Image (spheres, rainbow, N blue to C red):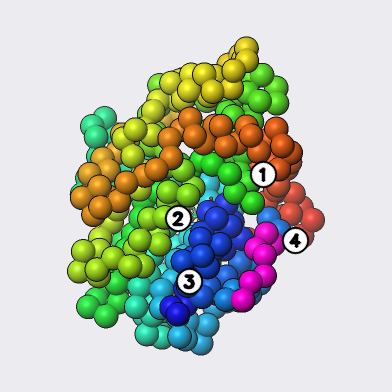
Amino acid sequence: MKKILVTGAGGYIGSVLVPMLLKKNYKVLAIDKFFFGQNLKSKKNLEIKNIDVRKLKKKDFKNIYAVIDLASISNDPGGEKFKKLTWEINYKSRVKNALLAKKAGVERYILPSSCSVYGYQKKIVNENSKVNPLTTYSKSNYAAEKKIKKLSSKKYCVVIIRQATIFGVSKRMRFDLAINAMSEGAFNNSKIPIMRNGDQVRPFCHVNDTCRFQIMLLRCSKKKISGEIFNVGSSGCTKNVKSLSSIVKKNINKKVKLLWYGDPDHRSYTVSFLKLRKLGFKTKFSISDGVKQITNALKSRKLKKTKKTITLDWYSHLYKKNKFLRQ
Ligand SMILES: NC(=O)c1ccc[n+]([C@@H]2O[C@H](COP(=O)([O-])OP(=O)(O)OC[C@H]3O[C@@H](n4cnc5c(N)ncnc54)[C@H](O)[C@@H]3O)[C@@H](O)[C@H]2O)c1
């Protein structure tokens, strides 16, 4: 049985990925500071460690087949508020850990970066296009990409994935992500929060799909993926924010109003997913699937919007109480 070290295992993506890995017969070492609580059920092949990723040592990577390095300050507002920490966690610590993993004999390292490194673009961009990171979050992700990509070798397969904005249900729910927030607002308040001016185009991807792809990368021939970057998402789930609100409206089946907020958002990009498809990966879940899944979970009270589901609010709350990392 191969053992996978997942950092950020208690996060939005990690809480979906870890059970999937266990189901696929991997052993998992789950590492997190569990700022959003510990949602992982204890299982035979699951080891859980509450550690700051910045403090990992070479011995933590012994007997690990692959690392999926999800831990980070995971959005733009968090990146601006906690700039120093964002550079430390998203960049410095990932570079250090990717190197420690290589030295410890780990065979694969997956860096879950973001399509936000594309920033603002007029044309369709692919993995070879010039990036344009506009925020601390995307700049630190891109800096990590550049350094870690260079570590790739015959024995050490490094893959960078640039994920679209994720949607869908997770035990560590995030209502600070566009589709999730719109679905919640429409369901609970009959209002869809929509960021000005609504023309910004973004790619989206269901949380189960990005996890499925990460697992595929553990099995893929190294030759096909080593040292490569893959955009993760689909053209079917690429929309401008206004049409996103129409999809939510259609699926919610009640009268809803648009609740405009913020200054015009300049992050707009259309991304090609051709490379992903050529590798043989197809996403399964549409935006409508995600909206239905979220509203059903809200209906059955499996999900609730709390401060914890808004990443920046929760980190700010923990910081005030001295329960978050110091900058
Ligand atoms: N969710 C998205 O839409 C999206 C899109 C593109 C890329 N990504 C990237 O995917 C990764 C996972 O995203 P997510 O949505 O699950 O984020 P998340 O905020 O839900 O999860 C991050 C996890 O990392 C943990 N963590 C943070 N700092 C830590 C530290 N110093 N030591 C140990 N644990 C620490 C947190 O407790 C949390 O559980 C992130 O790197 C994010 O930037 C996410």
Q: CA distance from mark 4 to mark 3?
A: 35 Å
30 is higher (above) or lower (below) than 289: below
Is any part of residue 283 visible from this angle?
A: yes
| Image quadrant where one finds the C terminus | bottom right
Q: Main secondary structure of the magenta part?
A: loop
Determine which of the numbered discs, if any, sits on residue 309 in the image.
1
Q: CA distance from mark 2 to mark 1?
A: 20 Å
Q: CA distance from mark 2 to mark 3?
A: 15 Å
The secondary element bearing badge 3 is classed as loop
User: What kind of residue is marked 4?
Assistant: Lys
Judged by depth in the image, the label closer to the viewer, 1 or 3, is: 3
Q: Earlier in the sequence, mark 4 or mark 1?
A: 1
Residue at 33 percent of width and 67 percent of height: 219
User: What kind of residue is marked 1?
Assistant: Thr
Left or right side of 306 for 261: left
The secondary element bearing badge 4 is classed as loop
Left or right side of 129 for 40: right
Residue range corresponding to the magenta coloring? 38-44
